Amino acid sequence: MSSPALVPVPFHGNTLFLVTHNDEPYTPMKPIVEGMGLDWKTQYRKILSNKERTCVVMKTIQMPNDGQNRDVLCIPLRKLPGWLMTIHPSRVKPEIREKILRYQNECDDVLWEYWTKGRAENPRVIQQDSSATSTLNLKAPIDFRQHVQLRKLIDEKIRILPEPLHNSAYSLIMKALCAFLGIRSRKDLTQYRFEEACQFVQNYPLVSLPELPVMPKTTKLDLNFPKETAKPSRSFWKDLPPDAPKDGLSIQDLLDPDYPDPLRQAIDRLEKAGYDVQGLWIQYQIMKGHLRSATKAFDEIYQISRVRRMP
């Protein structure tokens, strides 16, 4: 039996891993407790002693960097702030002590606002605008323009991944966003929380990538790429420096759309043969991105070097 899928979600500068239980996001507690420098056995007993309030469940999960499934104690994400309020700041790691104090003080203010005024608002979520009305419709769904804006943000986030992973990566981020906001789908996202959603996508770490579909491996695989396959049909740079290697390639050659690109051909063939080439794709795309961003700088260096060679 396969373990439930874990979804990484940013939370106050850290990353939580969520798992769905009864259509509600839950988070494993042991990584959080140990990450704060607290004793897990003590916190485990404390959480179980009040399990009617914390609504704990045991889920069989394979955590990151763990080679096997284990029974893990989880609580609803909506219960995590309440648990954090019970932690004494002096018992956590010094580097997160100030963050815990700030978080607890903010929770105190939120509860006071709720009980005395009937509503609490997050200043980081609501953008103050001089043209804003005095009343805010908390249930108004995001409009078409905002849907497009959110889609563009996600597309920008996943563009470094190989194209076969784009659809599953998009679904992964949307699932994490919905879990973070406590909604069922993007249709439930309101304008009140739109800025918060955008900030979440921008800060989302791609620490858990979807897997490429695995196909049966074939024994017929041509991976022969003699040096002729690396030569472009035409040289982008006609005037190479005198000291350039005979079989040298410029950055412009490597980025030219007509370049044969044997490295990409090899990865394509491995992928079509059923091999998991996710790591190769990621490195390839990142290297291409660095080449594109460095093209202008290298072109300037080349032009300067040519001027210096002139008598």
Image (cartoon, rainbow, N blue to C red):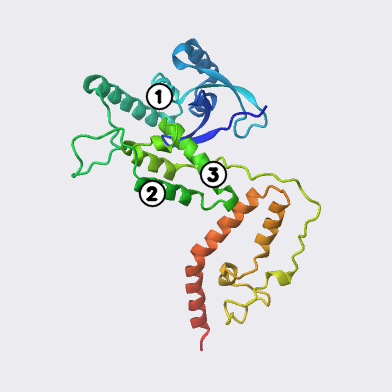
Residue 43 visible in the shown view? yes
Residue 88 placed where, x, y %? 40, 20
* Label 1 element class: helix
Q: Earlier in the sequence, mark 2 or mark 3?
A: 2
Image point (22%, 43%), residue name: 129
The kind of residue tagged 2 is: Gln
Residue at the right extreme of this rendering: 219
Q: Name the residue under label 2.
A: 149
Place residue 224 in its image quadrant: bottom right
Residue 233 placed where, x, y %? 65, 76
Instruction: Give the mark count.
Output: 3
* Label 3 element class: helix
Left or right of residue 168: residue 189: left
Q: Distance between the residues labelled 1 and 3?
A: 28 Å
Asked if residue 144 is positioned above or below residue 73 in the image, the reply reads: below
* Mark number, residue 81: 1
Place residue 10 in its image quadrant: top left
The kind of residue tagged 1 is: Pro
Q: Earlier in the sequence, mark 1 or mark 3?
A: 1
Q: Quadrant of the N terminus?
A: top right
* Label 2 element class: helix
Residue 288 placed where, x, y %? 56, 60
The kind of residue tagged 3 is: Ala
Q: Which of marks 2 and 1 is nearer the N terminus?
A: 1
Asked if residue 120 is positioned above or below residue 44 in the image, the reply reads: below
Q: Name the residue under label 3.
A: 169
